[in-house]
Amino acid sequence: MAHGQSRVSRLVLPVAGRDHVLGLANAPAVLVEYGDFECPYCGMAYPVVNEVRRRLGRQLRFAFRHFPLAEIHPRAQPAAEAAEAAGAQGKFWEMHDLLYENQAALADPDLRRYAGTLGLDITRFVNELAGGTWESRVREDFMSGVRSGVNGTPTFFVNGARHDGSWDADSLIEALMAPSRAGV
Amino acid sequence: MAETGFLKPGTPAPAFTLHTTADQTVSLSDFRGHPVILAFYPADWSPVCGDQMAVYNEILPEFRKHRAVLLGISVDGVWCHDAFAQSRRLHFPLLADFEPKGAVARLYGAYRPKDGTSERALFVIDGDGVIRWSYLSPIGINPGADGILEALESLQSAPSPTSTQQRA
């Protein structure tokens, strides 16, 4: 049984077809974020990830998974489901961006408004949110994070290992490009 | 008070009684028959929102599947714990290892005399009161719940060392 300080938390669910992914499948570096749309620290991480993506270009594959801390962020779960509902209509990343750019406005009417902005089928969007269509999918993300050692939001995994260092763009890039880890 | 080393699996968990509110105490022996997760952390009000206790709070249903009880413990006093628990909407007890300060943390070998706080340390104690898993985290790194859940799962598949008399 593992004990002591040598424990390394690793991503138990590899990035796969179920994931929302940006970048090429054969990119040498893989960054996974577990995030919460209402968490201010995740809001701060949003432009950082964009910068990392811009600077690494084709070398990076990025996946986002949900980790809503529903007790302290009551709108995190509906926002996560809204992103999935948008994803079902091919607009996950557009909704992801809108949610992070409007973290103070995540009430139901706001979510409907974003769906309208993205040109989604609103009836379908509203029905899926009301029916909890994406609840289990969000829970699946959450539990994969729990089993991987997510310890707050945001938590990043760099090439499969939990990134415990700071997550400014330079630090993330340094970790992503470290030779011992690349390609894991 | 003598400092013990960090307690390892197979060690009987030291008994304690601590205040969880101004007029309520909790004893480890209250939970005989149930696994107990003892989560020492340095202080309430760590400056991030998605912190260790907030994450564990969300995972309570998973712990309950193992009939396990989660106890948070730090050297903060009961009123501080009360405000912190309300702010984070925590649904598990926070124990005040407040007077004498850090006494329980010392019993578990999880006190930092220089800082005057406990370590960030996790113990999974079985229903017979034996430590079955322990983890001392680097102080700046919140341990996730992955190790706790693995330990709870292995509890279900293996009997307590004391009940089988296999430990020296």
Image (tube, coloured by chain):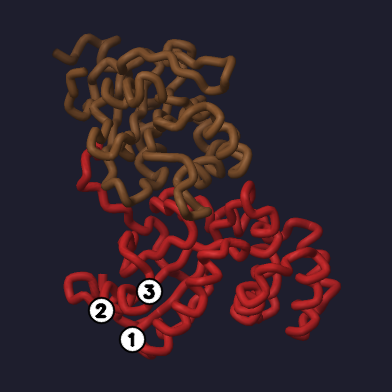
Chain colours: A red, B brown
The three-letter code of the residue at mark 2 reads: Met
Q: Residue at 56% of width from left, 44% of height from top?
A: B58
Q: Quadrant of the C terminus of chain A?
A: bottom left
The three-letter code of the residue at mark 1 reads: Gln
Residue A125 in the figure: left or right of residue A96? right
Helix, strand or loop for disc 3: loop
Q: Residue at 53% of width from left, 34% of height from top?
A: B80
Which residue is denoted by mark 3 in the rendering? A168
Q: Are marks 2 and 1 in contact (CB under 8 Å)?
A: yes
Which residue is denoted by mark 2 in the rendering? A177
Which residue is denoted by mark 1 in the rendering? A59
| Residue A126: percent from left, percent from top | 82, 67
Discs 2, 1: same chain: yes
Q: Quadrant of residue A105?
A: bottom right
Discs 3, 1: same chain: yes
The three-letter code of the residue at mark 3 reads: Asp
Q: What's the distance in space between the residues labelled 3 and 1, CA to CA? A: 18 Å
